[in-house]
Amino acid sequence: MTVTLDIPEDLSAALCARMGNLNRAAMEALAAQAYAAACFSVEQVRRLLMLESKWDAIEVLSKHSVWPGASADEILADARVAEEFLQQQGR
């Protein structure tokens, strides 16, 4: 899907000077709003923004004052990863 925004030239110049890449800024704002509205998970935010890790997605969300909480499934998944790591370390 492609979304186009029509921004008056004088306003777009001010936005670009302050925010840099407006496409990226708009995508991050959309992702943060979608997460805050419970439309997206952290993983969906990561995918939309083409980020490498969930921690990168959490960083973007926090930059937009959206503080992700951990769901029970996410906590259990993290626990499984930690257990696998400890097993690989021989502990």
Image: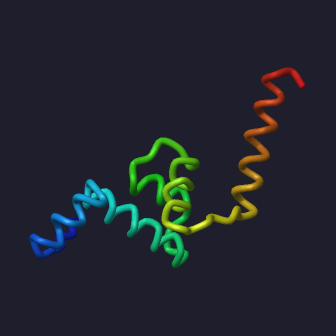
In the image: residue 18, left or right of residue 45: left
Question: Relative to residue 31, is residue 8 drawn left or right?
Answer: left
Residue 1: % across, % down: 24, 65
Residue depicted at 52% across the width and 78% down the height: 37
Q: Quadrant of residue 74?
A: bottom right
Mark count: 0
Q: Nearer the viewer, residue 25 or 77?
A: 25
Q: Vertically, is 80 above or below 36? A: above
Q: Up-down: is 6 above or below 1?
A: below
Q: Closer to the camera, 67 or 48? A: 67
Q: Nearer the viewer, residue 35 or 23?
A: 23
Q: Quadrant of the C terminus?
A: top right
Q: Residue at x 75, y 55 (%)?
A: 75
Residue at 53%, 74% (x, y): give it.
36
Q: Is residue 86 above or below residue 40?
A: above
Where is residue 6 drawn, in percent x and y?
A: 14, 75
Q: Name the side, left or right, on which 2 lies relative to 53.
A: left
